[in-house]
Amino acid sequence: MQSKRNDIIALLLSMCVPSLAALAYFVFLGESPAARVVYAVSRAFLIAFPVTWFLLVERGRVRWPTWNTRAAALGAAFALLVGAAAWTLYQYWLNEALDFTDVKRKAAALHVREHYVLFAAFLSLANSAVEEYYWRWFVFGRCRRHLALAGAAILSGLAFAAHHCIVLVVMFGSVAGAGLTLGVAIGGVFWAWLYDRYGSLYASWISHLLVDVAVMSIGYRMLETAG
């Protein structure tokens, strides 16, 4: 009972804090300097909370994730399909349907545009690794203790998509934002399944990394289109 209670507390915190932080730094604080502070604190939380909880509350022992070549290849194939779909969606819908003025304004406020390559590299390499460690190893892992694979993957995938939803709706509007959020949720469910099937966090990270590379390349084109 104590273990189950601990998992519920851990899940409530880990699933809610990123969305609350996104509301703060992307909605309520707008373009103020405080938004960048909250964003940095939220990134620190994603890194520190899981391992602190694991070591101090669960009394676990840290083990390095295992490598699985088949899982990595499957993850890479999924990422290539997603990247191709994302570019097609951008080329034949988003590029014509949306006004990227808000994207440009938000990028300027966060000082992203002048350092876009570094920002894209950080998100693609480091942030994807942190999110896999946080959402798949920690959040999905604790959901999986109490739910079947489908339920754990869907619940953790929806929680993973929730904070992305806030950013996407603000940037692209409710209709496009909701559609893109669904894509994020599908990715989260797939990466949870991949991790559960092969036990390799490296595979889900590589897949996530490649998807982020495709997304950030589209982001670069959006900023160029915005002028």
Image (tube, helix red, strand yellow):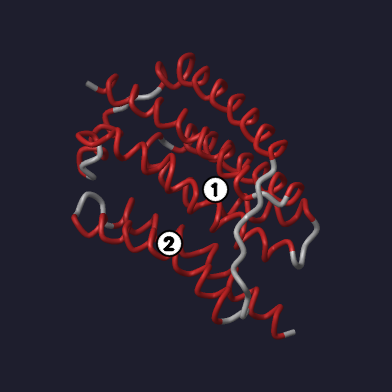
The amino acid marked with disc number 1 is Ala
Image side of residue 169 versus residue 211, left or right = left
Disc 1, SS: helix
The residue where tag 2 is placed is: 20
Name of the residue lying farthest toward the bottom: 2
Toward the viewer: 5 or 192? 192
10 Å neighbourhood of mark 2: few (<14), some, or many (≥20)?
some
The residue where tag 1 is placed is: 161
Q: Position of residue 73 (x, y in %)?
A: 67, 32
Quadrant where the N terminus lies? bottom right
Tag of residue 199: none
Image side of residue 111 versus residue 98, left or right = left
Q: Position of residue 128 (x, y in %)?
A: 48, 46
The relative height of residue 224 versus residue 187 in the rendered view (above or below) is: above
Task: Using the numbered discs, state the Cα–Cα distance from disc 2 to disc 1 in whole angstroms.
Answer: 13 Å
The relative height of residue 3 versus residue 62 in the rendered view (above or below) is: below
Q: Determine the residue positioned at 26% across, 56% down.
A: 35
Disc 2, SS: helix
The part of the image, by quadrant, that contains residue 64 is: bottom right
Mark 2 or 1, nearer chain start: 2
